Image: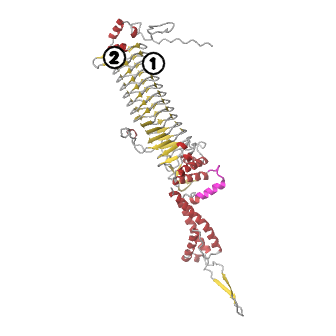
Amino acid sequence: MSTPPALAPAPPPWPHCGHGADPGTDPVGCRGIHVPGRTACLAHLDDTDRDAYLTGLHPGADIDHRGTPFTRLLLQSLLQALHDPATQKCRFGEALFDRARFSGGARFDQAEFAGSAWFRAAEFSGPAAFGRVQFSRLSRFDQAQFSGDAVFSEVRFAGDAGFSGAQFTDGARFGGAQFAHGARFSGAQFSGVAVFDRVQFSSGAQFGGAQFSNAARFNETHVTGDAVFDRATFSGPAGFREARFAGHVAFAGARFVEMTRFGPVVCTGTVDLSGAVFEVPVTLEIAAREEVRCERTRWESTATLRLRYATVDLSHAVLLFPVAVTAHPAPFITDTGTAVDERLLQSLEDRVCVVSVRGVDAAHLMLTDTDLSDCLFAGAFHLDQLRLEGRCTFAPTPTGPRHSHHIWLCRWSPRRTLAEEHHWRAQASGQPATPLGQPCSPRYWRTGPHHPDHDQTPDPEDVAAIYRQLRKAFEDGKNEPGAADFYYGEMEMRRHDYTGTPPGERGLLWAYWLVSGYGLRASRALGWLVAAMAVTIVLIMGLGLPDSSPKQVASGAIPAGGGPVTLIVDKQDPELTLRLGDRFTGERLDQAFRVVLNSVVFRSSGQDLTTWGTYIEMVSRFTEPVLLALAILAMRSRIKR
């Protein structure tokens, strides 16, 4: 099979010079645009015509040298022709250098471009110096190639600036530059060190798909608007120390090969790390007003996320090594020992909320001092190995009265609860959805993201499994009170599970809940104990105590001729014949109280009782010690460590 012939190079869309054209090798020749009134480009004009053209230029003149090859001397001649003696600077009007080729270095330092500046697909084979240049209007360097060091330090871009697809073979230095409008570096390739320290982007920055093969520095950069680094690749060290983003910043799908520290960063919007890949151990320090999104983020080594104010979403993140999410208690400290400026985040509540760990292998996750009130755990793996350190808070039960079957009952027992239980109870009770953007009232259960869709709301069996695993995590962390609350939640879900829990077991759970709150509510068990003792005292006084203590009677016969005497000692059965009103006296109350008090500690009082009283005491000696034991168990679960 023969190889198809290569396509001939296409000529540019402007009248071009054609110098050096060769039908065999280069049918187009020089691609430089004709100098006005001439048939050659500036590089191939004869000396007389070139001098005449340059003499006719003045500071601020419009020029068009697309495709023209510039040597260092030729560029210097052009710049000298545009030099303004009053400002000692070179001034351009409209400047077109698309596809121009600059060899031996191009120095535009301190030049002023009053009109648009076009350098699309331009080639700089040596150093390109644009230090302190002022671009008053549009400036475009898309697809430009910089083979030497490219310096844009302290440049002022008053209009849109475009570097999309540009290639920087050596260093790219934009330190101190100011972009008043959009800045686009999408798809740009930085083979050398890329420096954007102290750059100000006033209308956002686009670095989507950019490739940084060496170090990339964005230290003290300030972006107003959205900053986009989606699918960017940072193959070398990357620095964002003290960067500030007055908007959203996105690193979705970005790859960090050697970055060991990110931040400290201050962001008034969302920091999106979804789908990003971190290949080496890294520490991220982020203070964000809204969300730090880590959906499907891949951590291929250890990582520590030190956060302030932010809401964190870890849905389906891939954790190959331990990852810690920590709420930082104070402003971050810079390398110079000063606190990071957080004025952009004034009036925010100083807490870090984790809203989802769905799909995460929690065996590698540690959460410290975080708010888990709205955290979704459904779908996570190895929750029993999740480490919860410091003060991790969960959603409380509603503070309003408990409403069931159109009857207002007592208040909900205070305890730590999961967001999934809130969502199920809100859905099961028919609670209306919370209006978007408004916080949920603490008097009600919190509605879920899919409320009131029953199919997308976890059922009691699923929530019970989550409680069971997290209870073990609390137990392994020696947090018995926390484990007790999650045991209570597990029992609650089993009690309300009409599909996975058999009816008989549900009945036992109802009784266990009613009597002692699953052995965790001492007040409830003590209340039932006091009630049982009171009922028992009343029953003993009314049915159990006889009229008086029966006396023993000894009877026998004395043989006529003498000999041993046989006596038979007998005791009458206790009888109760008193009128009902005479049975409830202070003396009988004291006797009944002693009987009941001995029954509580599983002892017999020795008091003579009627047949009814004997059976009442037997029941009391079984139930009341059990209630006392449940109360002691509940108190122990709250104080054990």
Asked whether residue 533 is drawn in magenta, I would say no
Residue at image coords 55%, 66%? 530
Q: Secondary structure at mark 1?
A: loop
134 relative to 639, above or below: above
Q: Earlier in the sequence, mark 1 or mark 2?
A: 2
Q: Residue at x 32, y 14 (%)?
A: 80
Residue type at mark 2?
Answer: Gly
What's the colour scheme?
secondary structure
On the image, the x and y values in percent for residue 122 come to 43, 18
* SS for dot 2: loop
State which quadrant residue 54 falls in. Answer: top left
Q: Is residue 87 left or right of residue 456?
A: left
Region rendered in magenta: 497-513
Q: Indicate whether residue 501 is drawn in magenta.
A: yes
Residue drawn at x 64%, y 75% is: 610
- Residue to which mark 2 is pinned: 60
- x, y percent for residue 235: 48, 30
Up-down relation of residue 510 to residue 293 (above or below): below
Q: Which numbered circle lies on residue 121?
A: 1
Q: Position of residue 405 (x, y in %)?
A: 58, 53
